[in-house]
Image: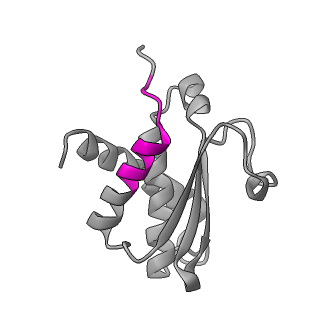
């Protein structure tokens, strides 16, 4: 099995702008943290298998997304799909849908994974 490509900060920024435009969240400020070390704000929730995390502040339309490209290479996941997965959390917060009361966390994660994979494929094809 071929190793997945790594995700650079520049590619993550480009893909984020692409995503924001297509999904209508251009008014959000999204900071990207592309590194393998878990950020301080995520240490309580991350484990060795965590590939990315998002911290949002919906009232201010701000988000910070952490993606660990080195962890993807070990696990065989594609980092771009994880970036899109995390961006879908931002969309969900923007619409007020991201609430465990409305949809169980496991279901949210499943949906974000499937859509993230599709978006990564569309992005790679230049759609």
Q: Nearer the viewer, residue 11 or 52?
A: 11
| Residue at the outermost top position | 1
Residue 26 at x, y = what percent?
36, 72
**The residue positioned farthest toward the front in the image shown:** 10
Task: Indicate whether residue 9 is drawn in magenta.
Answer: yes
Which residue is outermost to the bottom?
Answer: 59
Which residue appears at 56% of the width and 67% of the height? Answer: 63
- Residue 81, by quadrant, is top left
Q: Which quadrant of the figure has residue 41? A: bottom right
Give the percent coordinates (x, y) of residue 37: 72, 40
26 left or right, relative to 62: left
- Answer above or below: position of 20 versus 123: below
Q: Does residue 81 appear in the picture of this structure? A: no
Seen as rendered, the residue at the extreme right is: 44
* Percent coordinates x, y for residue 50 in the rendering: 66, 42
Q: Is residue 40 magenta?
A: no
Q: Would residue 39 be visible to someone looking at this image?
A: yes
What are the residue bounds of the magenta stretch? 4-16
| Residue drawn at x 82%, y 54% as measured from the top left | 44
Q: Nearer the viewer, residue 80 or 34?
A: 34
Residue 8 vertical placement versus 98 (above, below): above
Q: Quadrant of the N terminus?
A: top left
Q: How is the image coloured?
A: one colour
Judged by its main secondary structure, the magenta piece is helix
Q: Could you tell me which residue is drawn at 54 percent across and 77 percent down?
A: 102
Is 12 positioned to the left or the right of 70 in the image? Answer: left
């Amino acid at each position: 099995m071929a190793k997945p490509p790594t995700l650079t900060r520049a590619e993550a920024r480009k893909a984020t702008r692409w995503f924001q435009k297509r999904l209508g969240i251009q008014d959000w400020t999204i900071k990207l943290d592309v590194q393998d070390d878990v950020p301080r704000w995520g240490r309580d929730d991350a484990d060795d298998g965590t590939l990315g995390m998002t911290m949002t502040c919906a009232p201010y339309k701000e988000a910070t997304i952490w993606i660990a490209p080195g962890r993807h290479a070990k696990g065989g996941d594609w980092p771009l799909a994880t970036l899109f997965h995390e961006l879908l959390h931002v969309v969900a917060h923007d619409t007020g849908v991201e609430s465990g009361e409305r949809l169980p966390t496991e279901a949210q994660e499943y949906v974000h994974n499937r859509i993230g994979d599709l978006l990564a494929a569309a992005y790679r094809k230049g759609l």
